[in-house]
Image (cartoon, helix red, strand yellow):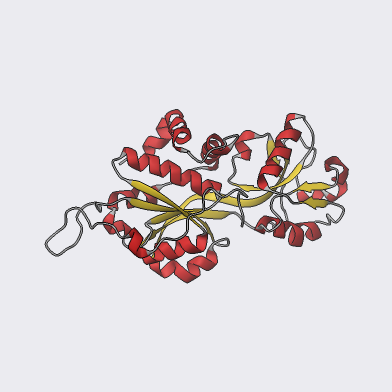
Amino acid sequence: MTKRSTLLGAVALTSAAALALTGCAGGSDDGSADGPADRPITIAVFNGWDEGIAASELWKAVLEEQGYEVELEYADPAAVYNGIASGDYDVTLDTWLPLTHGDYIDEYGDDMVDLGAWNEDAKLTLAVNEDAPIDSLEQLADNADLFDSTIIGIESGSGLATVVDEAVIPGYGLDAFDHVTSSTPAMLTELDTATSAGENILVTLWRPHWAYDAFPIKDLEDPKGLLGEAEGIHSYASTSFEEEFPEVFGWLSDFTMDSDTLYSLENAMFNGQDTDDYAPLVAAWMAENESYVSSLTAE
């Protein structure tokens, strides 16, 4: 599923030789590690997936405060999972299960470690302005005029666009609607304009997304389940990660982030920001959310 049309600097999967780093600091006589590895932690991040970028940037800042060196490597999902399974990357924080990334887990799961879901609300949605007089997709066909018979979509090749075209429109009898696909930024501009003007609007969206923190919107109920069930967002690590970084392994295994907190972080990082230098934005957010941030590394 395509998330953001503008990729944040795609980074190709580098070779294992390029990522080879020094061994563990300290160790027992039999060669086993008794402390953190004396090298950076490499977090692999999917190109263009906001929630994964946000979580990864947050953990980079948190771990650096704890004295670790952290590198973020951007790549597409196939390269990320190959890298985690081969040990070239240490961890990735944006695996949607059971559906979106299920095929990758089927292929690489035996060579990775599931650290569990840190958010359980990942879902495709159709959303409207909060004061729209309907609450369900079943009501759309009889209220097409409220939305100018238009669904404002994102990229035409995205999984969300496909589901809307192939399942939602025929399933709810929305043939009178024009599904206008363009780009995620264009959809968000339309959403901003309409909600600011107090006008009705119908958009394709997904959770988690900062739009839920930025705009007065609500999801339409999907009684037929055509948009799919909610998924969990999992962290996956290499098989050596626990031995090399036991403290961080424990923190990430315990990591949870509710949707409102995630929306707030994403909103601070992405809404109206024309930059991929997220460190100052994350630092400002952390200062405003000290209690939550402290809980991430609490004993």
Would you say 27 lies left or right of 279 here? left
Please say if 254 is above or below 197: below
Would you say 266 lies left or right of 170 here? left
Q: Nearer the viewer, residue 267 or 250?
A: 267
Q: How many marks?
A: 0
Q: Quadrant of residue 2?
A: bottom right
| Res. 276 visible in picture | yes
| Quadrant where the N terminus is found in the figure | bottom right
Please say if 130 is above or below 161: above
| Res. 296 visible in picture | no
Image position, residue 279 (x, y; %): 44, 37
Image position, residue 55 (x, y; %): 47, 45
Q: Nearer the viewer, residue 10 or 299?
A: 10
| Quadrant where the C terminus is found in the figure | top left
Q: Nearer the viewer, residue 79 or 286?
A: 79
Q: Quadrant of residue 20?
A: bottom left
Residue at point 70% right, 35% down? 192
Image position, residue 54 (x, y; %): 49, 43
Residue placed farthest to the left in the image? 29
Would you say 289 lies left or right of 155 here? left
Image position, residue 193 (x, y; %): 74, 34
Residue at point 41% right, 31% down? 290
Residue at point 28% right, 57% down? 21
